[in-house]
Structure formats: structure tokens, C-alpha cells
Amino acid sequence: MTSIKVENLSKIFKKGKTEVKAVDNISIRVNDGIAFGILGPSGHGKTTFLRLIAGLEEPSNGYIYFDDEIVSEPHRVVVDPDKRGIAMVFQNWALYPNMTVFDNIAFPLKMAKMPKNKIENKVKEVAEELGLASVLNRYPKELSGGQMQRTAIARALVKDPKVLLLDEPFSNLDAQIRESARALVSKIQKERKLTTLIVSHDPADIFAIANQAGVIIHGKFVQIGAPVEIYDKPYNTLIARLTGDINLIRAKIIENNAIISNLKIPLKNIELKDQTEVLVGLRPDDMVLSDSNLDRYVNVGKVKIKLVSYGAGIFKIIVSPIDDENIDIIVDSEEPLEVGTYTHLLVKINKIKIFDINGDSVFAKKSEIIK
């Protein structure tokens, strides 16, 4: 397989007299066989970065290497996309409506003038791997969303690529099908040891597939690490929101406790540097509502149940401190609770996130936080 190295990579688009830096001086290495996930808000450079890797855009500055070979340099694509050993799966799948599943998958092999018998064997092999053997004679309009997406992936894999690029590959799928699609791509990536870059706005895609991940904001990677590390220790509140649901609540600091109305959250072993106010970050799945104490949780105080909703197998319960019903805190629960009743809020001790009033994590070194 192939490692990818990027040095001082930038891409500037001109809109009239205005210059927009879609990718801003990125340097990064994706090791051979790794699945690397890219998260970020819309319009902050995720897809542009992927297109630069694919060779579909020329860099304004910087270099891209596949292993030790330069494939792009300033204002020049050195190695064309079709010579890079890449395969790309787009958000819209881009299947040919007038071709059968077999012909859609076979198309890149026919373009490469592979012998007919080898094409047939290769298509059947990949179709079997992706569960498409029974629909090879159907047309795209006769397929389910999941089957269309798997056909697009099969067309990418049939070339035995060195690098797989996925641009929002699951966004057009229903939630239930999305889970199985993630599992399939993760399985293929691991079995083939295929260097993979996946762009997504949905952190669930990244957590399911990626070994490493990066968050792009304003064209820069502001945090890189294992997905669970970014989820648990985001460098700022924007990253915290991008990687999952989170309650961000303003709190006063009194004797190394974060005080939110009647709620008291202990901040042991957290250096606050004379701060009097902070933002407390609490993930809904890191809290429990109970009148009994639990190991690894701290009881932070009494709350009132305001609203209960249900979705995707989880009850979302909105609670408020008993002294301030204007503060809403969302808690995940396996069971519903009665609206209007009172209970206690328990928080996992090692999952409490603290940000300064500017939104930067107190756990991250200032040198790590890229503005």
C-alpha cells in the first residue's frame, strides 16, 4: 500500500478580487494502511483537501508525496489522478443509469483495456465480497440505496487501488443502512490494509472507520489524534460540538469547583490559573440520572425533569438545576423519567471537559491550539 505525505499544502481560490484559502499550509503524514478521518464544518476545506490528494486540484503551494514520489507541487499536478493508484467514492455515487451493476463495476477495467475474461472474474470476485452477486444484471434504478452505494464502492475497489478516498459516502443512506455500510467499509479497509481517507460531517462515520482523525477549521488541521481522543479531549468548544452532542454551560469557579446554580462540579487536578469563570462541557452519554451513587461518577446535585423524548434507542432527557429552570442539560438514558419529578445528576469524573471563556480547553497546551 501507500503512505501519503503533505508538506505546506495550500489551495487558494479567487472570487473576483477576493482570495479564499480553502486549504492553509497543511503538513501531515498518513501512514501506509491507515484509515484517516477528516471532520470539519461545511466550507472549511475538507473536500478541497481530498481533491488535492486525488490530483483533481493543483496546489497553490506545497507538495504531496505518495510514498517518496512527488505527485503534486505548486501549480502543477505531477502525476495524473488515473496514474496515482487511487479510487474515489463520491457522495452522489455517480452510477451510470444505462449500465447494469456488472457494467458499472467493470467500467474502469474496460477503460484500462483489461482482457474480457479477467474483467468477468474480477467483477464477480468484488461483487461477492460486497454482497452484490445476485444483482449484477440489474440497473441502478432497480437497486436499493444500500446496493447503489455498494456498487459505487465495488467500482472503486475493482481496480485494486493503493489509496481509497471517500467523500461523504454514507450521507444519502437511511440511518439503519448507514450502520451496515460503515461496518462493510471498515471490514474491507482492515482486510485489504488499504490506505483510506474519509471526509464526513458525521462523527459516527469517522469513529466507525478511522484509526486516526483530524479536524479542519478554516483550512487548517486544528486537532489530530485517535477519534476517541478527539471526542474525549477536544481542544476547543467548536471541536467538541463537531464530534458529538455536548452541553456547554457557563459556570463560576469557587474553591476549585465549577458552580452552576445549585450544581457543584469538582475540578480536582485541573489547573485553572486564577480563572473565575469557565465553560463546562458535559456529554449526554457521560451522565446518569439517579438517586443512588455509582462508581466512577460524582453526584453534582439535584435536578428537575423538564422534558423526555425518544429516538434511536435512547431517551433524551432535559433537566435543569432546581434553582434555575432556564438552564437546560440534556442527558442520555435507557429509561424514561416522569416530567416534573426530581432526581440527582451524576457525571463521570474523568469525562468532565473544561474550557476557558474563549472556548479553548484548559487541558490542551496553548501551542496545540491553532486559531
Image (cartoon, rainbow, N blue to C red):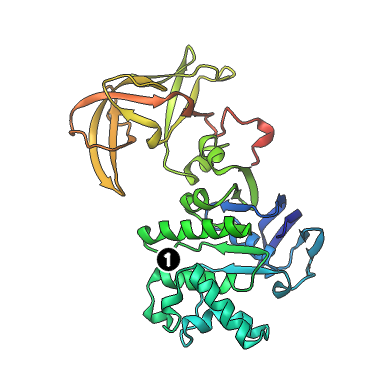
**Residue 302, how many percent across, how many down?**
28, 21
Front residue of 343/183: it is 183
Residue 247 in sight here: yes
Going by the numbered disc 1, the residue's amino acid type is Asn
Q: Residue at x 18, y 34 (%)?
A: 339
**Residue 305, how many percent across, how many down?**
23, 31
Front residue of 155/42: it is 155
Q: In the visual, does 132 lie left or right of 197?
A: left
Badge 1 local density, few (<14 within 10 Å), some, or many (20+)?
some
Residue 93 in sight here: no
- Which part of the image, by quadrant, shows the C terminus? top right
**Residue 45, how many percent across, how many down?**
61, 57
Front residue of 306/101: it is 101
Q: Residue at x 58, y 57 (%)?
A: 191
Front residue of 360/31: it is 31
**Residue 249, how many percent across, how many down?**
41, 31
Q: Which residue is mark 1?
A: 172
Q: Residue furthest top?
A: 255
- Which part of the image, by quadrant, shows the N terminus? bottom right
Against 271, is 338 above or below? below
- Which element is circle 1 on? loop
Please state the total of marks drawn on the protein image.
1
Q: Quadrant of residue 282?
A: top left
Q: In the visual, does 330 lie left or right of 185?
A: left
